[in-house]
Amino acid sequence: MRLIGNILWLVLGGLAIAFGWAVVGVILCITIIGIPVGKQAFKMAKLTLTPFGTQVVYGGGAGSAILNFIWVIFVGLWFAIGYVVAGVANCITIIGIPFGIQSFKMAKLALFPFGTQIV
């Protein structure tokens, strides 16, 4: 089921979203100041490529909390809202519920990417 879910996810838009995250990551990594944020964009791209069968482990310390706070204010809230809207739209049908659950997982990561690991 994990393989089929990931293939369907990629075909139905996941590949385009992952590509967008990767482009944002490359652009942010051009400057030295943008590298930490660019790394978070690559983390989102990785999760977007294969959301089924992966888990996000949250951790980090005070530094991650401060960076997450700044992230939420500037960009995280908007990305999370987009993922939640997509998740609700997917959950309208029974077939879309697994995809909606993955969208909610990505919404949480979009809010708090610093100090997390994708396993």
Image (spheres, grey):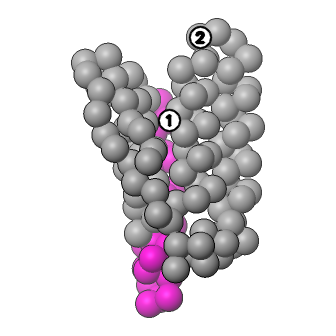
Of the two numbered discs 1 and 2 on the same chain, state the one appearing first in sequence: 2
Q: Is residue 114 above or below residue 8?
A: above
Residue 90 point in image, percent of width and height:
49, 77
Vertical placement of residue 63 versus 69, above or below: above
- Relative vertical location of residue 6 with respect to residue 94 in this rendering, above or below: above
Residue 8, image x and y in percent?
Answer: 65, 76
Depth order, front residue of 26/78: 26
Task: Give the residue at mark 2.
Answer: 33
Q: Is residue 103 above or below residue 60?
A: below
Question: What SS does tag 1 mark?
Answer: helix
Q: What residue is disc 1 on?
A: 75
Q: Amino acid at mark 1?
A: Val
- Give the residue at x 41% y 30%: 114
Locate residue 60, reporting x and y percent.
30, 27
Circle 2: residue type: Ile
Let me know if residue 80 is in the magenta part: yes
Q: Quadrant of residue 22?
A: top right
Q: Residue at x 50, y 35 (%)?
A: 75
